[in-house]
Amino acid sequence: MAEQIVAVKLDQSNKVESIAGEALGTEGDNPKAKSKQEISTFEQFLFHAYGLKGRRVALKKKVLQDISSSLSIPVEGLVELQKLVNADRQFCVPRQILLASREIEGYPLIKEALRKFVMEVMLSHPAFKNPKVTSAIRNLENAPLPHAALKLVMEEIFEKEELEEKAGEKKDGEKTAKKLVAAEEMKVNATNCLAVWFAVTRNLALEDVADALNVAVWTPAGCGADSDITKLRALTSIEKVEGVGLACEQYKRRAVAQADEAVRASAEAARLRTEHQETQLELEQIRSELDETKNALEKLQLKATEEIATLHQSAETQAAHLRDDFEQLRSRVLRRLVENVEKLGIGLSAIQGSEPKVHVVRDRLERVVDELQKEINKLREG
């Protein structure tokens, strides 16, 4: 981050060369820097932020109170400020401004002004020229997700002119020679700034920020280290150990959470397997009972069919017997009736003669009565 920034001569009457100390809390290469002038305007704060060249900047409450009533920047101030923005080719400052806005409490207009300024700087920088990245910055519909947007920034290819630093002027008036900006360092700075942008404007959780940076920056960079010495050099070249510790701690917590979740999932899987086995046993038992019931039903159906057939045969046999009995009864009764009618006819003939034969009539009548009485007795006996 400690890139050489082209010096910009500012008018001493209305520009700030270096403002720190009591008005601002700063951390950087020169922590003993003294304040030459307190910050009282929004313009002065932005000049101060760019003067720190990517070091941390923070706003104290007194400064917030002073600049809250002066958020506009005059035209000449915008011109000079644009020079500082152009000089920050490595894109070191906007992330620090965003972080400072995140720490502000109770001054929404200042926070909004700082974020709007950073958005304009981002949109004008070649690292964010991809339309998809632009839509993600503006949070438009169908914009890529944060991790995809960060990846697009890291995959950006720059033209030579975009990597050239603006020519500056020495004290004797001679211009310095142009030199190329380190593309990878600029992309990393831009990606980090975009990650902070998502965290600030979308309230993206730190865990999600770490995931997005891991996908877009850390993992691809780690894949490039193919030898042990390269990996060792990279591991021992880390300057900002806080970020590494934070990322490791987050992944450690996630690993612990995932391990706990795996244990719970394993226990749940074991419970489900046990329930499945018990269900299978119950199902087999139900199937067995169903087979037994089916067999019993088939036996009952077979038995009922046999009994019905037997009853049907018995009914037919009984009906045949009844028909025979009825025929015998009819024949017998008919025979007796015929015989008795003949006897009555004889008796009638005997009584109709010139000399009625009463004894003959009596005999025939008695025989008829006896025969009918026998038939009645047989019918009564069944």
Image (tube, helix red, strand yellow):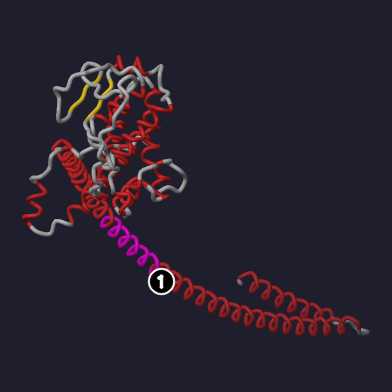
**Relative depth, front residue between 113 and 151:** 113
The residue at the point 70 percent across, 84 percent down is: 331
263 or 219, nearer to the observer = 219
User: Is residue 11 a member of the stretch shown in magenta?
Assistant: no
Instruction: Give the quarter of the figure containing the C terminus.
Output: bottom right
Q: In the rendered image, which quarter is residue 42 located in? A: top left
Mark 1 is surrounded, within 10 Å at the Cα level, by few (under 14), some (14 to 19) or many (20 or more) other residues, namely: few
| Figure quadrant of residue 353 | bottom right
Q: Position of residue 102 (x, y in %)?
A: 31, 28
Residue 287 is covered by the magenta coloring: yes
- Amino acid at the residue labelled 1: Lys
Tell me what residue is drawn at x 17 percent, y 30 percent.
28
- Residue 164 falls left or right of residue 350: left
Q: Main secondary structure of the magenta part?
A: helix
65 displayed left or right of 310: left
Vertical relation: 169 (above or below) 60: below
Q: Residue at x 35, y 31 (%)?
A: 81
Q: Which residue is mark 1?
A: 299
Write down the region rendered in magenta: 277-295
The location of residue 193, given as percent across then percent down, is 30, 39
Q: Nearer the viewer, residue 273 or 325?
A: 273
Above or below, 86 relative to 361 = above
